[in-house]
Structure formats: C-alpha cells, structure tokens
Amino acid sequence: MESFKKMVPYLLICAIVFLTFPAFEKDTDYIANIVIFFPLTCLITSIVYGMKNGFHLLFSIIVGLLFIPTMFIYYNTSGLGYIIVYAIVAVIGNFIGSFFKNK
C-alpha cells in the first residue's frame, strides 16, 4: 500500500494529460497526442518515478490502464493497442529511472 501511495502523484499526471489534452485538440491533432505527447508523458513520468522509487511493474500496468477512459471518451476502440504501447513505454522509462537510482 505504501508503494501505491508513492505512485499516485505520477499516475495523476498521466491521467490529467490523458484526459485534458484531447479536450483541446483540433480535428487532426489527435495523432500528435497519441503518437507524441502521451508516450512522452508516460516516459518522463516513469523515468522520474523510477529514479525516486525504483522499478515497479504495477506502475507501468496502471499507466497503460489509465488510457482506457480516454479511449472511450475521445476516441474509439481502435485505440485499444495504445494501452499496451503506453504500458511498454512506461516499463522502459521505469527501468531507465531505476537504473539511475541504483547508481
């Protein structure tokens, strides 16, 4: 439970970005959000989390799952694969961050 409390601020950042960026996008900006901004947010927050708290696979899984409401609110089920992509990006970022924590 203590490790989940440490995850909450970083997960909130991802959730806020996932839910607010699409609200302000124009018709063609959704590709930039899905391909650039969302993965970049996942990567940066995961690196910072990993540097401060080490590697936790649960963090990466939750980051991927946070995209589900966004997918149903703003996009359609064709974005289902991005859940896995964002989780993988979060695993990579979390691993990189935890590597720097150990040094």
Image: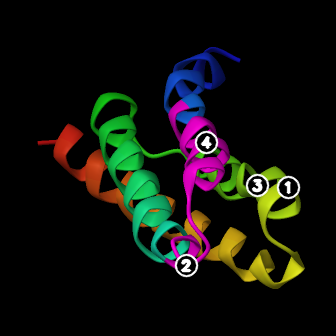
Mark closer to the chain start, 3 or 2: 2
Q: What's the image's color scheme?
A: rainbow
Mark 2 lies on a secondary structure that is loop
Residue under pointer 4: 20
Check contact, mark 3 vs mark 2: CB within 8 A.
no
Residue 77 falls left or right of residue 9:
right
Mark 4 lies on a secondary structure that is helix
Tag 2: amino acid: Thr
For the N terminus, the quadrant is top right
- In percent of width and height, residue 93 lies at 37, 58
Distance in Å between CA atoms under marks 3 and 2 = 17 Å
Q: Callout 3: few (<14), some (14-19), or many (20+) C-alpha neighbours within 10 Å?
A: some
Tag 3: amino acid: Thr
Residue under pointer 1: 73
The residue shown at (55%, 78%) is 28
Q: Residue furthest front?
A: 26
Residue under pointer 2: 28
Asked which quadrant contains residue 7, the reply is top right
Residue 24 belongs to the span the image colors magenta: yes
Q: Which residues are magenta?
A: 13-31
From the viewer's side, name the closer residue of 57 and 10.
Answer: 10
Check contact, mark 1 vs mark 2: CB within 8 A.
no
Check contact, mark 3 vs mark 1: CB within 8 A.
yes
Mark 1 lies on a secondary structure that is helix
Check contact, mark 3 vs mark 4: CB within 8 A.
no
Mark 3 lies on a secondary structure that is helix
Distance in Å between CA atoms under marks 1 and 2 = 17 Å
Tag 1: amino acid: Ile
